[in-house]
Amino acid sequence: MSSVAIVGPGGVGGLLGGVLTRAGHDVVYVARPETAAALREGGLRVRSVQFGDFEVPARAVGMLSDPVDLAVVAPKATSLGPALDRVPPELVDVMLPLLNGVDHMVALRERYPRARVVAGSISVESTRVAPGRIEHTSPFCTVQAAGPGADLVAEVLGGAGFEVKVRDTEAGVLWDKLALLAPMALITTAAGASVGPAREALRDDLEQMVVEVAAVANASGASIDPAAILAIVAQLPPQMKSSMLRDAEAGRPLELDAIGGSVLHAGAALGIATPVTARVVAQLRRAA
């Protein structure tokens, strides 16, 4: 069994940690002092349509002090800096960031030079309703990984029951998710509405943004078909809300830099114009 640190025990981190603990892995949660205290006192309780409902004890610390085989980094991008301050670089062998965007890869590899930082993404609907209380409402939880260390991710997470897909390229892992996430997050938040009303009210912006993001993704090494993305968007439940919209409704900081900023930064570096994406991101910055 492996030693695993969960950095950011929210909806994603809490679900992964709970299932890994139940599978017998040595899991430690790295969190803010108040969250760590709540986890130590109340343990972790998971309600999952895929894994069932269960409770496990939780070992939680405010600062990682022992080496781990795998560190899963899963806070919101807006909380990434303080979360990483709790993880000394010399204690991590393999790091799996499950973060939105692409810009974090360079920053993590600079900060953790001896670690194998895996390109990772996750598809799941899981929410932390209170410290140590996780509700996993999707009948799936799929992790994609690429690069050195991806084999350990597949062994640990796959062995615990998660679906893990090891990909050939990092660009495929990171941009496949962002190509859908960025347009939907930005459009729903700009419209202040769920998917159905947002895709009708801002259809032209949505279609152009999908084209822009796909162009940047493909120039970055991915293979994205804008028509396929739009077909997925058309099938999304009209009542669905993006996590960015939920953050906006709750008055929380938005992941604009991670989601929209990643597209704009890569587009600028590659010489690809992204005018609609830039306009929507600027609009949301002014409103934030």
Image (cartoon, rainbow, N blue to C red):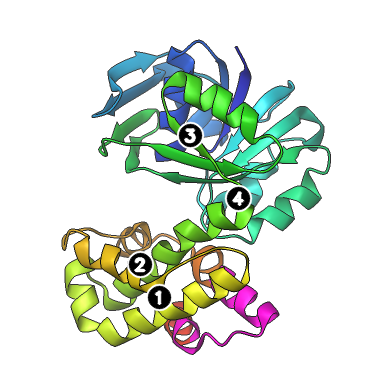
Mark 4 or mark 2: whose residue is earlier in sequence: 4
What is the quadrant of residue 102 in the picture?
Answer: bottom right
Q: Where is residue 45 shown, x and y percent of the image? A: 34, 22
Residue under label 2: 229
Q: Which residues are magenta?
A: 261-278
Q: Do the residues under discs 1 and 2 have CB atoms within 8 angstroms? A: yes
Circle 2 residues within 10 Å: few <14, some 14–19, many ≥20: some
Three-letter amino acid code of the residue under disc 4: Leu
Give me the residue at 27% from left, 39% from top: 138
Q: Which residue is mark 3?
A: 164
Res. 210 mark: 1
Left-right relation of 3 to 207: right
The residue under the point 22% across, 58% down is 240
Q: Residue at x 74, y 31 (%)?
A: 92
- Marks 1 and 2, Cα distance to the nearest angstrom? 7 Å
Q: How many marks?
A: 4
- Secondary structure at badge 1 equals helix
User: Is 137 placed left or right of 169 in the picture?
Assistant: left
* Placement of the N terminus among the 4 image quadrants: top right
Q: Of circles 3 and 4, which is in front? A: 3
3 or 4: tag closer to the N-terminus? 4
Q: Does the residue at mark 2 contact the one at mark 3 (Cβ under 8 Å)?
A: no
Q: Position of residue 256 (x, y in %)?
A: 49, 68
> Magenta stretch: residue 263 in it?
yes
